[in-house]
Image (spheres, rainbow, N blue to C red):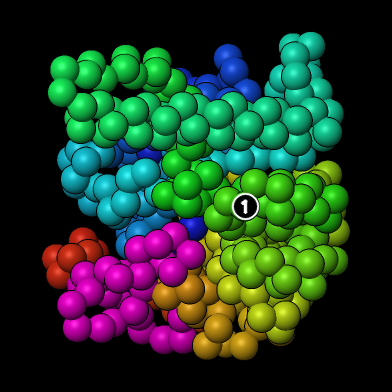
């Protein structure tokens, strides 16, 4: 089955606006997309019919640090039944998105350097929060060894700082949306400063700084594979982007960027085909939407390839996966058919 690294389906849209971005604050990191997910969104069925059996649902591009992401399968009647990994990571956004939303309100960030400041301040606050939490745990352990000693009161909980403390502790991964080369370099700067695990997503101009990304060993999820720019940040899009990154030794997946309002979910195989057209090896292009994508999301032990012990997520096609006339014949998720052959007429 195909693995989509960056989707926004299931986050509202049936009766009103989208539910993935909480624009009252630039850093609502305590939010969980699990609480916004609509299992009955018809787009999950469309994704399954397109051969996509695993998706990471992520916030859009409004918040500098948004809600925690979730990896799901397009089946089940509850968000918990759909979940494969939750939380799957923390979504960060650098560039035009946050500055457009909050700058229009006269709030920080209104500039790119403002977005970087917001990330730094949040992570410094999270580091202090984590220190107080560890000091309290040590004080409680020490009190247990002393007769009659009372453990100190716990520091106040912060729902927004807890996931960021987990990020700094290496328990969560940051999925950082950054398109322009300068935004990518800001992301690298923040990774160098705070030493957190990160994946660059979008990364339209990553080919301009592939060497710097490779030095840090960061995976990249490439989007905007279509010909021509979709917005101002992606005007320098190149089909050779994924091939350039792979040639530099960077683990590279391909996404449609449905979560960023650019591609359609059904275009995932097409996006991989365009990456192959741009020079990415065909086998690597197929891995970029299957096993490599699963590895980047942290779910490769269960999905991404056909191996004993993994989930039976299988797509049967009637031709070349990258052929424009190829049709999907069957789709199985966890061994159960979710797409069946059409009856003969």
Residue 178 percent across, percent down from the top left: 71, 49
Residue 206 percent across, percent down from the top left: 76, 63
Residue 19 percent across, percent down from the top left: 46, 26
Visible in this render: residue 170?
yes
Visible in this render: residue 328?
no
Q: Is residue 333 left or right of residue 294?
A: left
Most common SS among magenta residues: loop
Quarter of the picture containing the C terminus is: bottom left
Residue drawn 18% across the image and 65% down it: 334
Whether residue 91 appears in magenta in the rendering, the answer is: no
**Looking at the image, is 68 positioned above or below residue 189?**
above
Q: Is residue 109 left or right of residue 15?
A: right
Q: Is residue 52 left or right of residue 207?
A: left
The residues colored magenta run: 294-322
Element under disc 1: loop
Q: Of 271 and 150, which appears nearest the observer?
A: 150
> Which image quadrant for residue 36?
top left
- Residue to which mark 1 is pinned: 195
| Residue at the top extreme of this rendering | 106
**Looking at the image, is 17 positioned above or below residue 176?**
above
Q: Of 96 and 114, which appears nearest the observer?
A: 114
Residue 319 percent across, percent down from the top left: 41, 86
Q: Is residue 233 left or right of residue 261?
A: right
Q: Of 170 and 145, which appears nearest the observer?
A: 145
Residue drawn 65% across the image and 46% down it: 194
**Looking at the image, is 46 positioned above or below residue 303?**
above
Whether residue 309 appears in magenta in the rendering, the answer is: yes
Residue drawn 72% across the image and 80% down it: 248
Residue drawn 28% across the image and 53% down it: 84
């Amino acid at each position: 089955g195909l693995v989509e690294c960056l989707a926004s389906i299931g986050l509202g849209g049936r009766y009103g606006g989208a539910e993935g971005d909480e624009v009252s604050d630039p850093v609502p990191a305590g939010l969980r997309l699990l609480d916004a997910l609509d299992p009955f969104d018809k787009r999950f069925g469309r994704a399954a019919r397109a051969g996509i059996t695993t998706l990471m649902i992520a916030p859009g591009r409004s918040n500098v640090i948004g809600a925690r992401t979730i990896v799901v399968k397009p089946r089940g009647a509850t968000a918990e039944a759909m979940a494969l990994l939750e939380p799957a990571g923390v979504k960060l956004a650098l560039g035009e998105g946050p500055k457009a939303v909050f700058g229009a309100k006269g709030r920080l960030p209104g500039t790119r350097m403002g977005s970087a400041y917001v990330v730094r301040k949040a992570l410094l606050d999270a580091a202090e929060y984590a220190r107080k939490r560890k000091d309290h745990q040590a004080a409680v352990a020490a009190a247990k060894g002393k007769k009659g000693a009372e453990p100190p009161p716990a520091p106040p909980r912060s729902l927004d700082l807890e996931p960021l403390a987990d990020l700094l502790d290496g328990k969560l991964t940051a999925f950082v949306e950054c398109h322009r080369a300068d935004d990518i370099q800001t992301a690298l700067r923040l990774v160098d400063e705070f030493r957190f695990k990160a994946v660059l997503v979008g990364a339209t101009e990553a080919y301009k700084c592939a060497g710097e990304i490779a030095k840090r060993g960061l995976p990249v999820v490439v989007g905007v594979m279509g010909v021509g720019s979709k917005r101002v940040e992606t005007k320098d899009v190149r089909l050779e982007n994924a091939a350039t990154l792979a040639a530099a030794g960077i683990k590279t997946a391909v996404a449609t960027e449905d979560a960023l309002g650019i591609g359609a979910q059904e275009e995932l195989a097409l996006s991989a085909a365009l990456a192959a057209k741009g020079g990415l090896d065909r086998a690597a292009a197929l891995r970029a939407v299957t096993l490599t994508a699963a590895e980047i999301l942290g779910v490769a032990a269960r999905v991404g390839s056909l191996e004993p012990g993994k989930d039976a997520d299988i797509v049967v096609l009637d031709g070349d996966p990258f052929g424009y006339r190829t049709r999907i014949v069957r789709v199985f998720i966890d061994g159960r058919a979710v797409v069946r052959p059409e009856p003969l007429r």
